[in-house]
Amino acid sequence: MHLGDYIVIERQLGPFEFACESVSTGTPFTACVDEDKQEIFSDPAFPDTHPHACRFLRPEGNLLRCTIHRDSPAQCKFYRCVVMRISDPDEKFCGTVTGTLNLHSENAQLRALWERAEKEIPESCPDAEERRAEFLTSHGYRIE
């Protein structure tokens, strides 16, 4: 959500086309809103209420979508937002894990289990993401 601090829209070139700059590299780029995201992009409510979020993020259901996926700058392409969506043994969605291996969940049981996984499988392990997913799976959770 805070990549908005790294992408500046210099000017609008057309209804869904923008001249932008990647602040971290000083690299100019043109961003065209993906055709299938133009409808959600047209609603300015999200960027108006989240001023530090990327100006090209928009909610779609329970998800936040990048509306310029094809034209997004390198820092966005390398950033992994959600690497795991977790459902409990009853198949009820209960949390996500971001690319930085941080758990986002209100489920106390899952949080306690994740703390165990962090101790047993340190982030420095080359395959920590896969091993932690296997750990959760072995405890009855479903990982997408």
Image (tube, grey):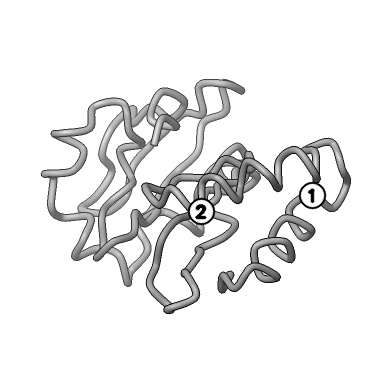
Q: Give whichever of 59, 12 is nearer the camera.
A: 59
Secondary structure under the numbered disc 2 in the rendered image: helix
Q: In which quarter of the image is residue 35?
A: bottom left
Q: Which residue is at 71% across, 41% downward?
A: 118
Q: Give whichever of 64, 24 is nearer the camera.
A: 64
Q: What residue type is labelled 2?
A: Leu
Q: Which label's residue is closer to the chain start, 1 or 2? A: 2
**Left or right: where 106 falls relative to 123:** left
Residue 110 is labelled as 2
Q: Can residue 144 be seen in this view?
A: no
Mark 2, Cα crowd under 10 Å, few <14 / some 14-19 / many 20+, is many
Secondary structure under the numbered disc 1 in the rendered image: helix
Residue 53, given in percent of the width and then of the height, sits at 33, 33
Q: Give whichever of 11, 118 is nearer the camera.
A: 118
Q: In which quarter of the image is residue 116?
A: top right
Residue 113, given in percent of the width and then of the height, sits at 60, 51
- Viewport quadrant of the N terminus: top left
> Could you give the CA–CA distance between mark 1 and mark 2, rounded to whole angstroms?
17 Å
Vertically, is 6 above or below 75? above
**Left or right: where 141 falls relative to 49:** right
Residue 128 is labelled as 1
Vertically, is 92 above or below 110? below
Among all residues in the image, which is located at the extreme right? Answer: 126
Residue 69, given in percent of the width and then of the height, sits at 47, 57
Q: What residue type is labelled 1?
A: Ala
